[in-house]
Image: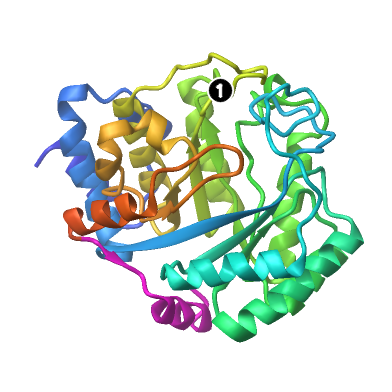
Amino acid sequence: MNRWVELANKVLSGESITNEEALSILECPNDDVLQLMHASFQVRKRYFGNKVKLNMIMNAKSGLCPENCGYCSQSSISNAPIDTYKMVDKETLFKGAKRAHDLNIGTYCIVASGRGPSNKEIDKVVDAVKEIKERYGLKICACLGLLKPEQALQLKEAGVDRYNHNLNTSERNHLNITTSHTYDDRVNTVEIVKSSGISPCSGVIVGMKESKQDVIDMANSLKELDADSIPVNFLHAVDGTPLEGVNELTPMYCLKVLALFRFVNPTKEIRISGGREVNLRSLQPLGLYAANSIFVGDYLTTAGQEDSEDHQMLLDLGFEVESVEEMKNNIAAGK
């Protein structure tokens, strides 16, 4: 039995991995990565079998953001040539939901740029969500920025199942990425979401000049927050942002990161998110031996691969897409 399988067995017995073990995952020799992914799959398989959850983003409001996040093409300090527009209307949100339903995508993610939503924007999302839930029954994830308790309750009452607010990086590295809000602001929003009864979704962006210890701290922070869904983004450095030209990641290192997040958060949905196409490249399929969820289609201001390619990838791997009906049953069961 190799050491990675032993580590998987430790996790499956309910034990947490040590900091030294976490570091050994990120420093796994490339020759051993296939064994590491095999061990990761033993953990993934215990809790998720061969199912894959599909998610689709609707960029409901683009640009016009006052924050200074260094990775973001929509921030106030970005010169990236992107489309900018205010919150789209209900019909546009509904049309996106129809497309998600037609593609058998279980989770429809309504994302809006900005520090946080206005009450008017909350009302617009609430109005659309009620109709979407009634017509299509999709799982709805909202991502609207820093949230107030009363806004979270409005979203919960409307039928929003999940709210995304990423930590993005470690507490130690936070000031290197943004100064317009604090790390605690982000943690507080996740706690507000949990208090409202909405499922918390919170993740990271890897590749922003952080250390390996920062990556380990991110995984552990999300474990402490008890995030149900953890999107793992890999930096897709956009020209015109402060992180323009940063290209620290390799496909093999990205696999190690995904394995780390699976070992630290064994029962949670680990989603391969933005930047997977440009960072994992031809090794994307291997990532799903640790992760059990992906975004399909385009991201906020960068393009994803064709959804037909994603479906073919899953078919080739022998994985099954979690159906909308299965997703509805999981919601009913509180999963």
In this orientation, does residue 335 appear? yes
Point 79% across, 42% down: residue = 185
Q: Position of residue 145 (x, y in %)?
A: 76, 49
Q: Position of residue 151 (x, y in %)?
A: 84, 65
Which residue is labeled 1 in the image? 208
- Judging depth in this view, the residue of 177 and 127 nearest the camera is 127
Q: Amino acid at mark 1?
A: Met
Vertical placement of 124 versus 259: above or below? below
Residue stretch in magenta: 319-335
Point 81% across, 67% down: residue = 124
- Is 323 magenta? The answer is yes
Vertical placement of 74 versus 62: above or below? above
- Judging depth in this view, the residue of 32 and 58 nearest the camera is 58
Q: Position of residue 46 (x, y in %)?
A: 27, 63
Point 61% across, 18% down: residue = 243
Q: Position of residue 320 (x, y in %)?
A: 26, 66
Point 82% across, 43% down: residue = 115
Vertical placement of 184 versus 245: above or below? below
Q: Quadrant of residue 155?
A: bottom right
Q: Quadrant of residue 31?
A: top left
